[in-house]
């Protein structure tokens, strides 16, 4: 599956589901926004709850660019997030 991307301030951010899910499996998952590669990359995280129970890849594929932008603007930098390891910059 091709991963979605969004453009924010002329940077192309890749969007991935994170490996962390709740105990309910398909009710909520994390979204990772990543710009660049290597040690200079920027990462941001947020959570997403699809309306229907489905796989994370299927739920992510159904999100529109506008929805992904909204999630990006709600996201937090990796160093403030449990998915980002708190404090790792």
Image (cartoon, rainbow, N blue to C red):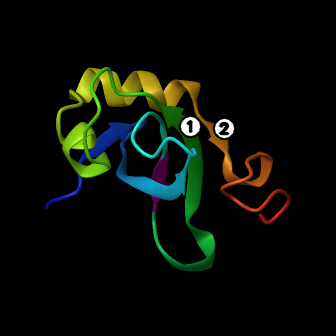
Element class at badge 1: strand
Location of residue 8 with respect to 19 vertically, above or below: above
Mark 1 or mark 2: name the one nearer the start of the chain: 1
Q: Nearer the viewer, residue 50 or 53?
A: 53
Q: CA distance from mark 1 to mark 2?
A: 7 Å
To which quarter of the image does residue 83 belong?
bottom right
Which residue is the site of mark 2? 76
* Number of disc labels: 2
Q: Residue furthest front?
A: 24
Residue 46 numbered tag: 1
Residue plotted at (58% across, 34% down) = 75
The location of residue 15, given as percent across then percent down, is 36, 50
The secondary structure making up most of the magenta span is strand
State yes or no: discs 1 and 2 in contact (Cβ < 8 Å): yes
Q: Which residues are magenta?
A: 31-35
Toward which corner of the image does residue 43 lie, by quadrant? bottom right
Quarter of the rendering containing residue 38: bottom right
Front residue (pair 2, 27): 27
User: Which percent across, then down, holds residue 18?
Assistant: 48, 56
Q: Is 86 left or right of 36, judged from the image as shown?
A: right
Q: Name above or below for residue 28 compared with residue 25.
A: above
Left or right of 65 on screen, residue 34: right
- Is 44 displayed left or right of 4 in the figure? right
Residue at (28%, 21%) from the top-left corner?
66
> Badge 2: few (under 14), some or many (20 or more) residues near its Cα, within 10 Å?
some
Q: Residues within 10 Å of mark 1 (few under 14, many from 20)?
A: many
């Amino acid at each position: 599956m091709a991963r979605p991307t969004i453009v924010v301030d002329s940077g192309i951010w890749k969007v991935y589901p994170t490996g962390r899910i709740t105990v309910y499996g398909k009710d909520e998952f994390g979204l990772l926004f990543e710009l660049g590669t290597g040690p200079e990359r920027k990462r941001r995280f947020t959570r997403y709850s699809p309306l229907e129970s489905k796989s994370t890849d299927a739920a992510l594929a159904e999100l529109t660019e506008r929805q992904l932008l909204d999630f990006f603007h709600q996201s937090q930098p990796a160093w403030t997030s449990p998915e980002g390891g708190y404090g790792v910059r």
